[in-house]
Image (cartoon, grey):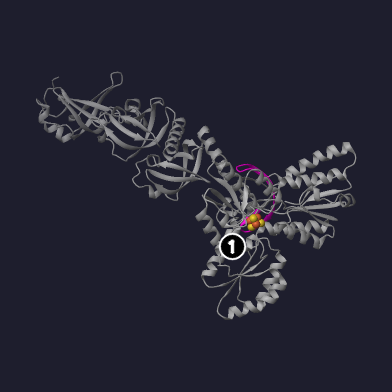
Amino acid sequence: MADKIVFDNGKTTITLAEHAGFCYGVQRALETAYETIRKYRDNEDTQVRTFGPIIHNDDVIDGLKEMGVFICDAPGEVSPEDVIIIRSHGVGRDIESEIGQRAHRVIDATCPYVKRIHKLVSEAHEQGKQIVIIGDRNHHEVQGINGWCGYSAMILDNVDEAVSAVGKIAGEKTEGAPVFVVAQTTLNRRTWDECTGIILDRIPDAELNCTICSATGNRQNACRELAKKSDMMIIIGSRSSSNTRKLFEIAEEECSKTYFVENKRFLSLKDVKKCNRIGISAGASAPERIIKEVIAYMSEVITNNPEEKESSMQDMMEEIEKSFKVPQRNDIVKGEVIQVGPREVYVNLGYKKDGVIPKDEVSLEEGQDLESLFKVGDEVEAKVLKTDDGDGNVLLSRKKIEISAHWNEIVKAFEDKAVIEVKVVREVKGGVIASYKEVSGFIPMSQLNDRYVEKADEFIGQTLQVKVSRVDQRRNKAVFSHKTFLNEEKSKKIDQIWASLHVGDVVEGTVMRFTDYGAFVDIGGIDGLLHISEISWGKLKHPQEALTIGQKINVKILSMNQEKGKISLGLKQNTPEPWSVIDENYQVGQIIEGKVVQLKEYGAFVEIEPGLDGLVHISEIAARRVNNIADELTVGQTVSTKILDIDYEKRRISLSIKAALPEGEAEEQPEEETAE
Ligand code: SF4
């Protein structure tokens, strides 16, 4: 975010620096203090006190005193009923331990950035290193840091001290103690660079740990830039605040009319009226209330017209309000990308703080990076994870927004009964976890396939099409089914097959199985019944007399009932009914071969083709007299016969074996009478 013009009457502007006011550590310490006060307010056996001023701001300290929270300055002052809140600047290890032994309870409000320095210094000290702290030796923070290396640190307040001390440091180093340098968190960056430059000149292997807090750096940079553009700078904060004093020094370097004000009473109204471009910055411990008061007071002085005064005051208060506003956790915010790096994206939200989206909070496809996904100027939407990431930015997540959108897509798919694609990621008890973009759901074992699944691991890594069977976003639960998808696809395919078939169509099918009454034939996804009577024009005792399993045949659809799922098929219909074409194939007097299919007392029936039987009367079986047909013929025997007659009306064919005998054979037999 940029500097904020909070007042503009066409003649004079008042601009608030991009970074000004409470930092993360101060905000956190005060929230801790107020929470502790609330907690112990009604407990008469305890007394809440702070160890040292909780932050360096007299207004805040006075406010706490009014609430009955006083400062205790030394461990000896701590009594057993005290609930001690350790100041944001921290204390030494020995003091912390002594307070812990004396107090009822200790609440540590030390800024985490300061705590980090305690840890660094403590470890380096244990490793035998010589600690050097660049900072103000009278400041609580520096004294506290020194207390984590047994008060053995060498403290350099400024460049002159660095110049005169570096020889001593180098001397100690030659005695074998490596040098470990840290900074007071509010140190001016220029002082750090100059002091460490001097140290490195003499001790090139000195370990430098620039522990200047980014909140400090941000405030200092913003203050310097604003001071360059202003003809008057107002630095708001307490004189006891080190970082506010540093801001004052920086502003003074760039703007000759720089004033340090603790509150509106310190304002030089005469100078305010003379200047047109007034810049304002505030220390990390300056409360928002005081900053607003100072700005309001100045604008009142600048504006003379009462009407203009009222409306400009209103506008101004709104602007100030906006500049201090910070989005709340879980808010969805929109902003403009102002910087894209390999590890994070910075977004101008139009609030007091900028937003930062770390790489982990963006869904990236394989091989994709932030630079390819975001461009400066892009508008992005994100969800607020934290109002402060520790560096003074609002911590944002794109992923959380995407997850929300992905949940919405799943809910919609559930409502619309639509299909979504998921990737199976791991096996769990009773099934697998599959991810839909950023959302994970469960597929029970029984829903992984339309057949029995013994081992789920074969599905890991597979992309499956699924239907959503259950969804509960509040509980973060979604259940998917691949089986339902497969079954529905099958049923769709079957519907398509039904729609493509018509009675009378001839289709290819495969003989699948037999029953006594026919054969089931698969005609491309559905089975139809080929009844035994529809297999052949002749008579069959079992379908396997004419067919084999797996045989491909062309069948005619005789009837269909989609509701009952039944299709009747016919095979014999592929050839003409024999009597309908008998004239084309058979004539009286023609000699043909046939198979004896039935024996009767009066003659034998011979099948000349399936569906076409003729009768050989007993008198026509042989050239001699036959008394018992079974003596002459057997069922299944192939015989040569002559067609004697074709009766179209009665559908009868008279045959004669005798007449079909070669002439010699027929003549050799004595003539016998035939009897019915
Ligand atoms: S300036 Fe930095 S180190 Fe100091 S309290 Fe604020 S956040 Fe913590």
Q: Which quadrant of the figure has residue 164?
A: bottom right
Determine if the magenta segment contains residue 333.
Answer: yes
Q: Is residue 599 left or right of residue 139?
A: left
- For the magenta stretch, what is the residue range? 326-345
Q: Is residue 569 left or right of residue 436?
A: left
Q: Which residue is mark 1?
A: 117
Query: Residue 651 at what x, y percent from top left?
Result: 28, 21
Query: Residue 20 at what x, y percent from top left?
Result: 72, 52
Q: Which quadrant of the figure has residue 649?
A: top left
* Residue at x 55%, y 48% (from the top left corner): 83
* Residue at x 59%, y 65% (from the top left corner): 146
* Residue at x 66%, y 76% (from the top left corner): 166
Label 1 secondary element: helix
Q: Is residue 216 above or below residue 554?
A: below
Front-lying residue, 112 or 563: 112
Q: Is residue 651 visible?
A: yes
Query: Residue 136 at what x, y percent from top left?
Result: 68, 65
